[in-house]
Image (spheres, helix red, strand yellow):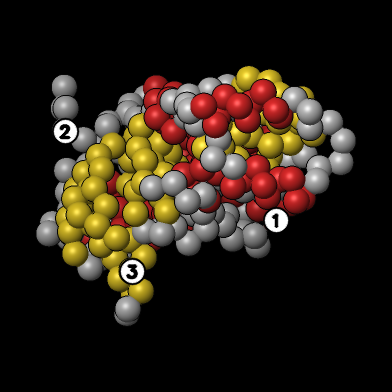
Amino acid sequence: MNDAPAVAVSKLTVKFGDFTAVDDISFTVKRGEVFGFLGANGAGKTTTIRVLCGLLPPTSGAVQVAGVGFDTGEMAIKRKVGYMSQKFTLYNDLTVEENLAFSASLRKLDRATFLKRRDYILNFISFQRPLNSFVKDLPGGIKQQVSLAASMLHDPEIVFLDEPTAGVTPAARARFWALIRDLAAQHKTIFVTTHYMDEAEQCDRIALMRTGRIVALDTPAQLKKAVFPGQLYELDPRGRADYTRLQELRRDPGIEYFEAYGLRFHATFRNTAAGAQLQSRLDRDFHVREIVPTLEDVFIRIVEGTSP
């Protein structure tokens, strides 16, 4: 069995003029892993994926994708990967069959190989619409599945999914993630970006990016433990939240972390006398209860917050 990583990135930097989009990042992705790549818009996720798909040469550093890199040639990388962008990569005025045939021609698949792969993938995704259906007439979730099929025609080892479920219904998202798990079970490596934290929970490991750098990388469970080693609390205001009082809380020496979470607040307290005293006083203004941190808490603290 090949134990080499599916993706190996070493000191990757990508610059556009004076702007550094990706700043000296290193990581590996295991074969057959569902690897989540999370970050705010502009964090450098899509730029990194473009490099890993052979679409953009790095400014410096090295990448190996399914054992090949830019020193072998960008086409060698492109043959190893499938890419589904955050916008549907289909032509609305073409039929499903025409879209798939066009994708196959770009990959230089012969007719027999195309038909075999087409039938296999459409069966795999349980596609039941007529092949002469125009893409513009398909629901968003079905378009998304056809787009995945187009990216899989050449049987890539690694599939890059850049926000593949943006703008589709929760039911369609659930079906799509069932497909992702099925692909991983077939030893395909899945590299996915998403803004949905319930989707991120389904990844084997997650990298969090902020301003071009990877600021955390681990399993969902270990990320929660690392970012919130102490108890996390939910504070539910007993009445209308007082803005002045909330600002005082943020500055209180007993508070370690304090962020709005809908109409409530999530907080951790310092393991000091000031923290203990503050907890005893909060009952006057809030219903306080212990909660388990979620990936959304991790994302807010690490990616959108000021934590190092």
Left/right of residue 285 with respect to residue 205 in the rendered view: right
Tell me residue 296's x, y (percent): 57, 37
**Is 66 placed above or below 78 here?**
above
Residue 4 is tagged as 2
Tell me which residue sits at (16%, 22%) in the image: 1
Earlier sequence position, callout 1 versus callout 3 = 3
Q: Residues within 10 Å of mark 2 (few under 14, many from 20)?
A: few
Left/right of residue 179 with respect to residue 13 in the rendered view: right
Q: Looking at the image, which is closer to me, 153 or 46? A: 46
Tag nearer the camera, 2 or 1: 2
Earlier sequence position, callout 2 versus callout 1 = 2
Q: Secondary structure at mark 2?
A: loop
**Which residue type carries mark 1?**
Lys
Tell me residue 109's x, y (percent): 34, 50
Q: Looking at the image, which is closer to me, 250 or 21? A: 250
**Which residue type carries mark 3?**
Thr
Name the residue beneath numbered marker 1: 136
**Is 19 placed above or below 196 here?**
below
